[in-house]
Amino acid sequence: QVQLVESGGDLVQPGGSLRLSCVASGTFLSINKMGWYRQAPGKQRELVASRSSSDSTNYADSVKGRFTISRDNAKNTVYLQMNSLKPEDTAVYYCNAIVQTISYAYEYWGQGTQVTVSS
């Protein structure tokens, strides 16, 4: 079993910055991909950013140039640096990981952390 624990969500003013963290723990061989999704009220969950074990990244168009995803593989941790935050970035942010075991790759989700951008 694998657990993902997020932290860093908060209330911030428009134009401000936040840094989210997600730590993976449990039994696995490696983490193939880690990323962040978000879900705003009344909307579907959407990909924000992801980073593979080969360091390829993928960003939603709405956050390109403002958000940066990074990983510390030694600590099984993924970060999301969010700058120039806008009210439309308000959502619950979920950590996602594709974890490799001996036999299969499994997908896991964190419990979510609330980000609110408001004056």
Image: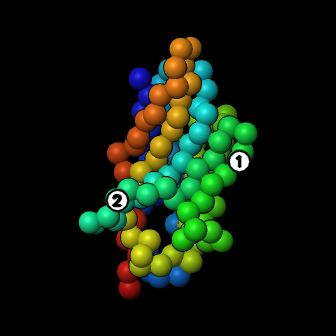
Q: Residue 39's spot in the image, x, y percent?
A: 36, 60
Q: Secondary structure at mark 1?
A: loop
Q: Which mark is residue 21?
A: none
What residue lies at 73% left-to-right and 39% top-to-bottom?
Answer: 54
Q: Is residue 37 above or below residue 41?
A: above
Residue drawn at 62 percent across, 68 percent down: 64
Please give the residue where the numbered disc 1 appears in the rendered image: 56
Given the image, on which type of amino acid does mark 1 rest? Ser
Residue bearing the label numbered 2: 44
Q: Is residue 101 left or right of residue 7?
A: right
Image quarter where the N terminus lies is: top left
Classify 10 Å Cα crowding around label 1: few (below 14), some (14-19), many (20 and above). few
Q: Is residue 71 left or right of residue 19?
A: right
Question: Which tag, 2 or 1, sits closer to the chain's start?
Answer: 2
Dot 2: element: loop
Q: Within the image, what quadrant is residue 62 found in?
A: bottom right
Residue 16 position within the rendered picture, expressed as x and y whole percent measured from the top left: 52, 77
Q: Nearer the viewer, residue 12 or 84?
A: 84
Residue occupying the point 42% across, 76% down: 88
Asked if one can make out residue 98 in the rendered structure from this viewpoint, the answer is yes
**Position of 89 compared to 77: left or right?**
left
Amino acid at pointer 2 = Gln
What colour scheme does the image use?
rainbow
Residue 45 occupies which quadrant of the picture? Answer: bottom left
